[in-house]
Every structure is written in structure tokens, then in C-alpha cells.
Image (cartoon, rainbow, N blue to C red):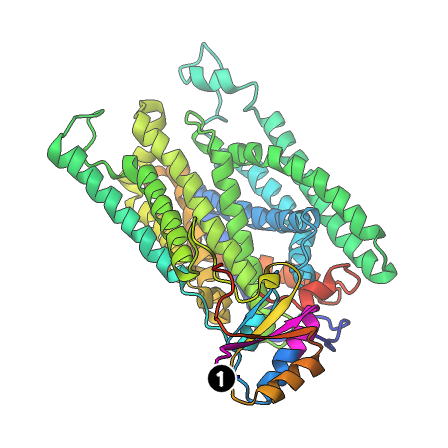
Amino acid sequence: MGNIKYILGSFGDPDEMMHGIEKLQENNIKIHDVYTPMPIHGIEAKLGVKRSRLDIAAFFFGITGTITMLSFVYYAAAVDWPINIGGKPHFALPDFIPITFELTILFCAFGLVGSYYASSHMFPGRAPRVMDLRATDDRFVIAIDAAQNPEHSKIDNLLKEAGALEIKYNERKYVSYE
Amino acid sequence: MGTHNYNFTEQFEFTGKPKMLSIIGIVIGLAAIGYGLSDHELHERTFANLLLMAYYFAFVCMSGAFFLALQYVAQAGWSASILRVPQAMARTLPLAAVVLVLVIGAGLYSHNLYHHWNAPGLTDPSSEHYDKLIAGKSDFLNVPFFMFREVLFLAIYSFFAVMFAKNSVNEDLEGGLNYYNKNFKYAVVFLALYGFTTPIFAFDTIMSIEAHWFSTMFGWYNFASMWVSCLATIAVILILLKKSGYMPWLNNSHLHNLGQFIFGFSIFWTYTWFCQFLLIYYANMPEETVYFYKRLEYYKFWFYLNLLLNFLAPVFLLMDRDNKRSENVLLIVSIIIICGHWVDLYQMIMPGSVESHNGFGFIEVGIAAGFVGLFTFAVLSALSKQPLIAKNHPFLEESLNHHL
């Protein structure tokens, strides 16, 4: 059993899986991650998952867009090629609010898609990293790091008691490369 | 999540400090009106302020009914446990409507309001006061038709507002889905009527003060203003109720939803404000720019204060998730927005009515205090008549377990 990397408890029912998480936590067994085919309410709090920092990233992507457009428009309309339009100042701020707004949104949206791909190790053309293929279909999977938690038979029993339909011992972290 | 044992029959008791303060507010308001009417010079300013607050009072209550209709049509679950507060506001709408019609009627009768289109000789070609533009608009802007529209619109809104509240109380007594479905049907009709008539209502009540000028964005701009100030008012009432020990089921996910609404519609308000401003600024046509010329020339402070309070403050204070979920921050932002929309209305009404004779003193503060007192008194007494929760609302369980 030396080269087992992850123990996977595969459940058919989300409530049983939540119960399994509780059981493992009661026995001080650290859960690596949980994979489910659908979002489950309250699971982040139970696993102690930290809040996503995507909103902070969004703010900075957005503000980058704002600054980019305002500086470009200032350069284009006031420095490089000033034109008198309706007698208004060259850098007539209200005129440039809509385009600044658009670029803020554009930078924010592209930036967020990029960050999402980067943080979830996904990219078009790249095989996604999946520990158990059925977690993308109809199974709710709890993954436990086998090296950090040496009491494998105890974990096995706990998962079975909680109602796991199947328990796998993966020798590779991800099964989806092949 | 899970089980709960809340007391669904608990009622709000309207006594003590809130009652005292609202009565003091009403007394201050009456004193301010008395002071304003005692001096002939101040008549117009008093009437402009009365119109401002009566309109504010009516549109917050109208939007309370709009909030209810929206929740019923969307079949929203999160709000089921807080509906009694907007229902209390909706129940106050008939009173607010009467006050607004009285103020408008008295203003028209005494020529203190709307004198721009309601003065002798304006539509008479032989008179020296003849105004071709006003004469052209006089089929629409004449006193009987104007009053008819005001009364009709407010009567429609009041009818639906009262029906929503009534059906909800009947639902408490009898249970079942019957009254919920009824409210759904009423809400569909109400939303259609409301959507088409509020722009006209805003054109009449506020835009006609400067009858030469027009903007098709004005109706939406006012709608955004009334909707966001109504949401802020609901938030203030809920948070103060929670702080005084009522509504234990109100959790910070409900506040988060309200906070998102307030944040989003503050930006929507800015969007409509800016749509109106940008087109006028860009096109630069004299008959349109006159509106902003007045505001930027004589009302510069109020003009920028308006944007500060209604756009910058909510955007920066409510952007963070934790701030939307915090009672204290949401309370402060809501109060800023309520004051902000007073400023918004102030810079909509004053430049056209009192022009450069505006001021900010006892009349403004006193009349505002009076109407806040009247609103608080009427809404809280309406709230104290039923239990604080609609116990047979079909989505109540979802609302009690609401978690974001």
C-alpha cells in the first residue's frame, strides 16, 4: 500500500456525503477536497474553504481598464491630436465616461475568465484534472490524502459506515490524463 | 438551516421613543409650515419644500407597493419574512396620496407652484404674457387634466397597494395558496400600469415645474430615485426593528440581498442621471442645456453633493461583501441615500421654482422633519396592526432559512 496517493470515498447521495464529511472531521482526518457534480449549499463552510478572492481581482482588473482608457483618451484627444468638438474642452470627461465604463467591464470580464482558468487549471485544449471521472456525472467524492492520514483501514470503515458506495485507492493524483 | 421556533404572532408595539420622536417631528414640521406661511416672501419656498417632501413621501410608499409587486411576480422566496414592512408602507400610500394632492392643489390654487405653465394670459395670444410653447402644451398641461391625472394615478397605486396588504392579511387568517395567487395577478396588472404611468407622474409633478424644458429620461430618472430610496427606507426600518429586538429571523443574508439591491440601483440611478446629462451636454442645444445651466450656475454645491451622496458613497461603502452584511454599515449607507435623494429632489425642484432665492434653513429641515415624522408615525402604526410575519406565505420556510 506504499504508493497509494489518495483515498476516494464515492457516494451516491449528497446528504450521506455530508454525513461522511462530519464523521471524518470528528475523527480528525483531514479532507483534501470534495468533488460533486452539482453545487452543494453550505459545503464551503463545512470544509472551511476560504472565501474566493475573485472579487478583489475583479476590482483591480476593472480599475486597470478605467485607467487604461482614460489615459489613452487623454493622450489621443488632448495631447496627440486635439480637435475642437462643439467648443468643448479637449478632454471633456463626460463624453468619455461611456467608453471608460465599457473598457472597465471588458478588462474585468477578460481578467476574470483568465483568472478562473488559471486557478482551476483549465484551459481549452488541456485535459482537465479529475480525481474520479464519475464525480463529473453522478457521484459525490471525498478525497483524502493517503500520506497525511496513515490509518487507511479506519478511513475505509468510516466512509463505508457513512454510506460510501465505493472506495478507491488512487496511485496517481489525477486519473484523467490518459 | 434546520428547525426554528420563532414567535409568528409577535406584533410591533408602537409606543415610547419612536412615537414621541415622530410626534415631535410632525410638530416641528407644522411649525416650519406656519413660519413659512407667515411671511409672504417665503410662500413659494415653503410650497416648493412641501411639494418636495410630499412627493418624496408618496413615491417611497408607491415604491413599497412596487417592491411587493416585484416580489409576488418574481415569486421571490428570500423576502417572504420581511414583506410586512413594505406592506405597512403600501398601507400608508392613501394618506401620502391625499397629502400630495392637497399640496399640489393648494400650490396651483395659490399660484405658488407650477406658475410657469399656470398663470393668467399664458395661452391667450392677445395677452402680453402669451407664451407660444406653453400654449402649445396646454392641451396636456391644464389644471383640470393635470389634477385628474394626479388623482387617477395615485388612486390606482393606492388601490393596488392596499389590496396587496389586505390579501396578505387574509392569507394569514385562511392559509392556502388562494390569496398568494390573487396577489400574483394583482401584481402583474399593477406592474404594467406602474411602468407606464410613473414616467407621466414624474413629468407632471416635477418636470412641469420648468415647463419649457423636457427630457424623456426624466421619468426613469425619477423611477430610479424612488426605487432606491424606498429600498434604503425598507433597510432602515428592518435594521431598527431588529436592533430593538423584533424580527429575530432577519439574518445578514437578507441584509446582503437588500444591500445588493441598494448598491445595484444606486448605480442604476447614476446611469439614468448620466444618460440625461450626457445627451444634453453632448448635443448642446440651448433649450435643453438651460436645465443644467441653472443647476451648475446657482446650485453647483447641490449638484455635486447629489452625485457624492447617491453615487460615490453607496458604490464605495457597499462594494465590499462584508459591508452589505453588516447592520451598522448598511444602516449608515441607507441613511446617506435617503438624505441623498432629498438633495436629488432639491436640485430638481428648487432651480425651477424659487430659482436663485433658494436656501437651506428652518423651512427645509423643519418640513423634512415633519414628513419624516408623519411617515414614521403612519408606517409604524400600520405595522403594529398585524403580526410582523406573514405566517402562511408559501415561501416562508425558504426565507427563514435564507443563506447566501
Q: Mark 1: which amino acid?
A: Gly
Q: Is residue B58 above or below residue A152?
A: above
Q: Is residue B342 above or below residue B402?
A: above
For the N terminus of chain B, give its image quadrant: bottom right
Residue at x-position 61% and y-position 40%: B101
Q: Quadrant of residue B390?
A: bottom right
Left or right: where does residue A18 sit relative to residue B269? right
Residue at x-position 42% and y-position 57%: A116
What is the magenta range? Answer: A3-19
Q: Position of residue A110 (x, y in %)?
A: 37, 48
Residue hosting label 1: A2
In-front residue for pair A41/B67: A41
Mark 1 residue element: loop
Mark 1: give few (<14), some (14-19) or many (20+) Cα within 10 Å: few
Q: Position of residue A8 (x, y in %)?
A: 58, 74
Residue A15 part of the magenta-drawn span: yes
- Most extreme residue toward the top is B126
In-front residue for pair B30/A99: A99
Q: Position of residue B40 (x, y in %)?
A: 43, 43
For the C terminus of chain B, give its image quadrant: bottom right
Residue at x-position 69% and y-position 40%: B190
Residue at x-position 46% and y-position 72%: A50
